[in-house]
Amino acid sequence: MDHTHHSSDPAVADLRGGFTSTRFVLVEPSHPGNVGAAARALKTMGFSRLVLVSPRVPNVQNDPEAIAMASGADDVLASVHVVPTLADALTGVHWSIALTARLREYGPPQWTPRAAAAAAHGEATHGEIALVFGNERTGLSNEDVERCSAIAHIPANPAYSSLNLAQAVQVLAYELRTAYLGVDETTDGGPTAAAVAVQSESAGTRAQMAASDEIESMFAHLESALVALEFLDPANPKKLMSRLRRLFARSGLEREEVNIVRGIAKHILLKTTRTD
């Protein structure tokens, strides 16, 4: 990681903010070695925030195998944040990417790591973002994926597409670093068009984005309203809420927009529960 001091340079300050506002979340990791290797993968790319959701080995950050695989990234490993649920891991996050091993019919939009990193570059300048990785054996549940704003899928060799967890973290961390630095290797190190567009965007023109917990509360409220309207049958919900999640994930919800949807839900519930 570059330790030179350019604190007076606004571009460098923005860059540093992008690296520090990005957290990597491992959901129920099984192997301490993968946790240590993930810490190493983050540090080599300039990131440091690692969150573990209910790891199989308690106190995994002190496990000898994790420490050995961290190989010098002891500081990242020692400062991991351990939480019981993905909802806790996403507290304060306004945008998140779920890495999935397979393409899905339902859920948020699905991107290559490079496309996801380009989007993350813009989102990280406006608040906390997260990259979410599943368990080594079972990956992420549908419920976990639907909590996220977008999906990244590494287009690996179809004959053998099984990436190790820490290797997947490395791929995404590299793509994020490349996007955050705004360097395109095909243009001799010049900034990418996406980077120029993000840099030219005025920071003050963007409305405040809704946080993950606010969006989840909105969906719960909206679902209650649709049930009360008898538009949604709880006994046969089909894919209605999944499709609505996909719709809203594509749009990127601002806090005011979440409040509008909740206001609509509130008035639906008031109308449908009123007794004459």
Image: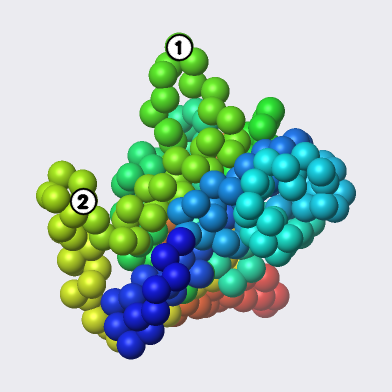
Frontmost of labels 2 and 1 is: 2
Asked whether residue 77 is in view, the answer is yes
Q: Can you say whether 164 is above or below 113 in the image?
A: above
Label 1 SS:
loop
Q: Quadrant of residue 23?
A: bottom right
Pick the front one: 62 or 272:
62
Pick the front one: 51 or 116:
51
Pick the front one: 25 or 252:
25
Q: Can you say whether 159 is above or below 181 in the image?
A: above
For the residues labelled 2 and 1, the Cα–Cα distance comes to 30 Å
Relative image position of residue 195 (x, y in whole percent):
23, 62
**Furthest residue toward top:** 159
Tags 2 and 1 touching, CB below 8 Å:
no
**In the figure, is residue 211 to the left or right of 2?**
right
Relative image position of residue 18 (x, y in whole percent):
42, 68
Relative image position of residue 179 (x, y in whole percent):
32, 56
Q: Residue at x 39, y 53 (%)?
A: 176
- Amino acid type at image mark 2: Asp
Q: Can you say whether 157 is above or below 241 in the image?
A: above
**In the figure, is residue 267 to the left or right of 118?**
right
- Give the mark nearer the N terminus: 2 vs 1: 1
Pick the front one: 50 or 46:
46
Label 2 SS:
loop
Q: Which residue is mark 1?
A: 159
Marker disc for residue 184? 2
- Amino acid type at image mark 1: Ala
Image quarter of the C terminus = bottom right
Q: Quadrant of residue 202?
A: bottom left
